């Protein structure tokens, strides 16, 4: 039972790393970005490319994945997304889902349809025995995922208390008043969007050893990213974190104990939570639902 819960937590950390960026763009910036998984895929392919072609180590490739996804996000935000801020939800959905299909086709053409080969570095292979947990053996890689998720959570919570976080909240609540006080709302949104995409890219690179990477990644896991945001509450940080852990544990436990049910338990869990908390577990006040 302990292994199942731990594997679910590790899986949930991956969902959090990718889904928290979607929570920011949907809840704070009020943009329905269904192409968020594209940036996770871009980070994964960037990491693979850096390791295979340039000989970078896994840890350096993680930084490259974050940078590539953030730069791609900044580019697309300036060229496409910015034009639809405040537009109808349907327009945002059509743009972002169109980007998903374009990205799938581009990735297939550039990298082929097969799953990308990947090997963990020696430092993340094998098991660690924890004597204080009754000798429970946990995978090094999954422990690394948990540590990364915890560090990102702490960094985002601290960022929310900084001047940047206060300006983002002010710009979302009333862009005109924020601009009148000297805040560059356009630049602020671009930086925030790029940060959200960078986190998705980091999550995509970290998922190489657990989920694999192939061109249909953005479509295959889109529902799970949306689950994290809907269950946790758009616009918050702690909400998606809690939701990602719960979704990860429910999904792994369901596949372990009731494999015939498939993903049914996850959707049942989502429906139950949203019936009790229609706006999510910890939705930000005033966030888009």
Image (cartoon, grey):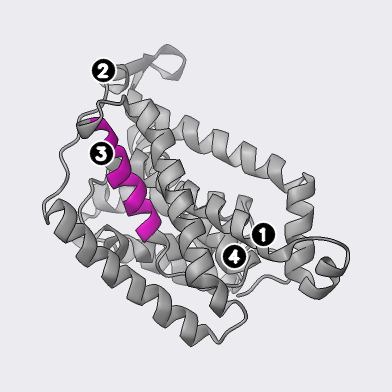
Q: Main secondary structure of the magenta part?
A: helix
4 or 1: mark nearer the eye: 1
The mark that comes first in sequence, 3 or 1, is 3
Q: Secondary structure at mark 3?
A: helix
Residue 201 position (above or below residue 77): above
92 or 120: nearer the viewer? 92
Which residue has dot 1 on it?
187
1 or 2: mark nearer the eye: 1
Measured as percent of width and height from the top left, residue 49 is found at 25, 39
Q: Residues within 10 Å of mark 4 (few under 14, many from 20)?
A: many
Kindly report the distance in space between the C-alpha atoms of the residues bearing marks 1 and 2. 41 Å
Q: Residues within 10 Å of mark 1 (few under 14, many from 20)?
A: few
3 or 1: mark nearer the eye: 1
Which residue has dot 2 on it?
122
Q: Residues within 10 Å of mark 2 (few under 14, many from 20)?
A: few
48 is within the stretch colored magenta: yes
| Tag 1 near tag 2, CB within 8 Å | no
Which residue has dot 4 on it?
234
Q: Secondary structure at mark 4?
A: loop
| Tag 4 near tag 3, CB within 8 Å | no
Q: Is residue 232 visible?
A: no
Which residue has dot 3 on it?
48
Kindly report the distance in space between the C-alpha atoms of the residues bearing marks 4 and 3. 31 Å
Kindly report the distance in space between the C-alpha atoms of the residues bearing marks 4 and 2. 38 Å
Measured as percent of width and height from the top left, residue 133 is found at 44, 20
Q: Secondary structure at mark 2?
A: helix
């Amino acid at each position: 039972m302990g292994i199942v819960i731990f594997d679910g937590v590790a899986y949930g950390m991956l969902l959090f790393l990718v889904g928290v960026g979607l929570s920011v763009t949907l809840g704070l910036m009020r943009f329905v970005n269904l192409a968020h998984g594209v940036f996770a895929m871009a980070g994964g392919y960037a990491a693979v490319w850096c390791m295979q072609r340039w000989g970078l180590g896994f840890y350096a490739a993680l930084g490259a994945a974050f940078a590539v996804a953030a730069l791609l996000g900044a580019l697309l935000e300036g060229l496409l997304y910015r034009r639809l801020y405040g537009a109808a939800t349907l327009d945002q959905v059509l743009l972002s889902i169109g980007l998903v299909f374009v990205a799938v086709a581009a990735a297939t053409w550039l990298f082929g349809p097969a799953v990308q080969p990947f090997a963990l570095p020696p430092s993340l292979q094998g098991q660690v025995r924890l004597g204080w947990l009754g000798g429970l053996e946990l995978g090094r890689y999954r422990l690394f995922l948990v540590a990364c998720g915890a560090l990102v959570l702490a960094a985002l919570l601290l960022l929310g208390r900084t001047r940047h976080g206060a300006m983002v909240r002010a710009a979302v609540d009333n862009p005109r008043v924020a601009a009148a006080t000297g805040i560059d709302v356009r630049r602020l949104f671009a930086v925030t969007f790029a940060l959200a995409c960078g986190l998705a890219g980091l999550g995509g690179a970290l998922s190489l050893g657990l989920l694999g990477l192939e061109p249909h990644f953005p479509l295959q896991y889109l529902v799970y990213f949306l689950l994290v945001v809907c269950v946790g509450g758009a616009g918050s940080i702690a909400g998606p974190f809690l939701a990602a852990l719960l979704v990860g544990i429910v999904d792994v436990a369901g596949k372990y104990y009731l494999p015939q049910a498939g993903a049914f338990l996850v959707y049942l869990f989502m429906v139950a939570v949203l019936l009790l908390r229609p706006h999510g577990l910890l939705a930000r006040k005033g966030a888009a639902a």
